[in-house]
Amino acid sequence: MLTYDSTGFRLDGRPLRILSGALHHFRTRPEQWPARLASLRAMGLNTVETYTAWNVHEPAPGRYEREGELGAFLDEAARQGLWAIVRPGPYICAEWDNGGLPGWLTARTGRRTRTSDPAYLAAVDAWFDRLLPAVVERQADLGGPVLMVQVENEYGSFGSDRAYLGHLADGLRRRGVTVPLFTSDGPEDHMLTGGTLPGVPATVNFGSDPEAAFAALRRHRPGDPLFCMEFWNGWFDHWGRPHHTRDADEAAGVLRRILAAGASVNLYMAHGGSNFGTGAGANHADPPFNSTDWTHSPYQPVTTSYDYDAPLDERGAPTAKFEAFRAVLAEFAAAHPDEARFRDDREPALPELPPVLAAAPVELTESAALPFGPALASPVPPSFEELGLEHGLVRYTADVPGPRPLLPLTVEGLRDRAVLRVDGERRAQWERGAEVEPPAVPGGVRIELLVESLGRVNYGPLVGETKGIGGVRHERQYLHGWLAEPLALDPLPAAEFGPDPAGGAGDGERLVRGVLDLEATGDAFLAVPGGVRGYLWVNGFLLGRYDARGPQTALYCPQPLLHPGRNEITVLELGAARPQKVELRAAPGPG
């Protein structure tokens, strides 16, 4: 049994310093978990922390997917001699789409999300009924790896609904969670008063100045153990912004100070992994900007890579930060062998990684029309969520009444990109947050808007935003009478491929496909030379989005997605002519 007081933790009566690393089960392929978890232990960590993203497991109301994944991950952690910390949300932030909340739910609950609103709580309760047995069965009290379970996530950065937090904590206990609960927040007075609960230990999240952070925690919770639940040793990237790095020795120095303070720690991240599919979230900066340059928009979508400049890079290879942290943790273990202990006495070993495939081109020789779903007629453009679409594309079509002269066409509430065609001819494109001169359009024409969703905001007041367009005005007049055709992109939609009718040079978005023949598999980095923005699949699995604005220049493809023989590589380019090839690269590039 794990117990605690102001001096720290004790497990079964013996002192325990929790030395944890974040590794999210949904950001790494299950086949890779053994190696990733073994690497955490080889670094000197005795615990792994993971979030669970609700929207991964319930992408539509009552439709559950990948249900056994969390339990399997916790079982593997136990096999690797690690304890575990579980952070089930329901909100997780994590630079993940919508902070892990399902878009279909937040479209209904709106501003009532993350409160004690009955409709929101009913959905949370149904989800926890489904999720928590996998955690309860694996608690340390029962011989399993789970040491602690978090209540919500950084709630003090959002709200002050104590009844909501209490409902979550009571629900965890009612469903059988007996290990210690905890909250985590920034080390600010308003966060620690808004996001904590009486009787539930509080932890703090920070990247530097541990002494000040722990002093703030002590002011509010003098009887709680010191714990940095998120030591931000790196940072995430946005498209069109520089790649983030942090000096390894400087970060290791902060880790040393955390341990010297007598605190437990969770490295955020130990291994970041990838935002596969459409999982990447977004941030929204305040105050709003006014710019025609999308890279300076207040809306900042997160890259497909979640490398995070972590001790283990995106494909799991140890970095200089890994070595620096391992040295600090070894130094601590030598001085405190009674506290820095593992679940078993096996000697940790750093596993070998698969090779990276050599650089090579993959010619894209076939194409297919986009297989949009049935059209829905509506007076106004329906949102993605109203169409039952979490992410992907929607083609909106309407007729402009006429005769009338050329007048400006304005798209309102765009989330997040749109390409305009007038009578089939490409005329303009919009990016969320960028100022664009409205194109002039006459009456008597048909307009088509191909709208693409990017990540939902995962932090702050815009969590829960819907996708699509709010409306279209011709001068001041709203256009009504719309047809909306949705297309989900994850997994690869079924389509009829054949020779490209325009040889790759035609106007209009199409899927293009090529074949990669392999004698032996390995990890790979895939790039689309000449591509502006789009999506890339391997054997039907959506790796994620690519964007020429960087900083990420190639998408990581884990070895388990490839097999000897024929492998199909599919691309959807949305910003330029259809690409002619994909390149395997020997390294990921700047991002």
Image (spheres, rainbow, N blue to C red):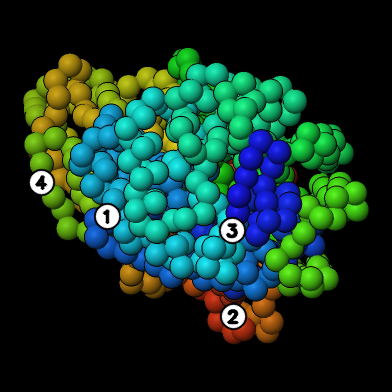
Q: Mark 4 points at which residue?
A: 377
Q: Name the residue under label 1.
A: 126
Which circle marks residue 1 in the picture? 3
- Identity of the amino acid at label 3? Met
Helix, strand or loop at label 3? It is: loop
Tell me the distance, in whole angstroms, between the alpha carbons under discs 4 and 2: 43 Å
In primary-sequence order, the first of circles 4 and 3 is 3
- Identity of the amino acid at label 4? Ala
* Above-or-below relation of 334 to 221: below
> Which label lies toward us, 4 or 3?
3
Q: Are marks 1 and 2 in contact (CB under 8 Å)?
A: no
* Residue beneath the point at 61% across and 35% down: 224
* Above-or-below relation of 113 to 298: below
In primary-sequence order, the first of circles 1 and 2 is 1
Helix, strand or loop at label 2? It is: loop
Q: Name the residue under label 2.
A: 563
Q: Are marks 1 and 3 in contact (CB under 8 Å)?
A: no
> Which label lies toward us, 1 or 2?
1
Looking at this view, is 567 or 56 the one in front? 56
* Residue beneath the point at 43% across and 70% down: 68
Q: Position of residue 590 (x, y in %)?
A: 72, 45
Tell me the distance, in whole angstroms, between the alpha carbons under discs 3 and 2: 44 Å
Tell me the distance, in whole angstroms, between the alpha carbons under discs 1 and 3: 28 Å
> Which label lies toward us, 4 or 2?
2
* Residue beneath the point at 17% across and 16% down: 476
Tell me the distance, in whole angstroms, between the alpha carbons under discs 1 and 2: 38 Å
Q: Residues within 10 Å of mark 2 (few under 14, many from 20)?
A: some
- Identity of the amino acid at label 2? His
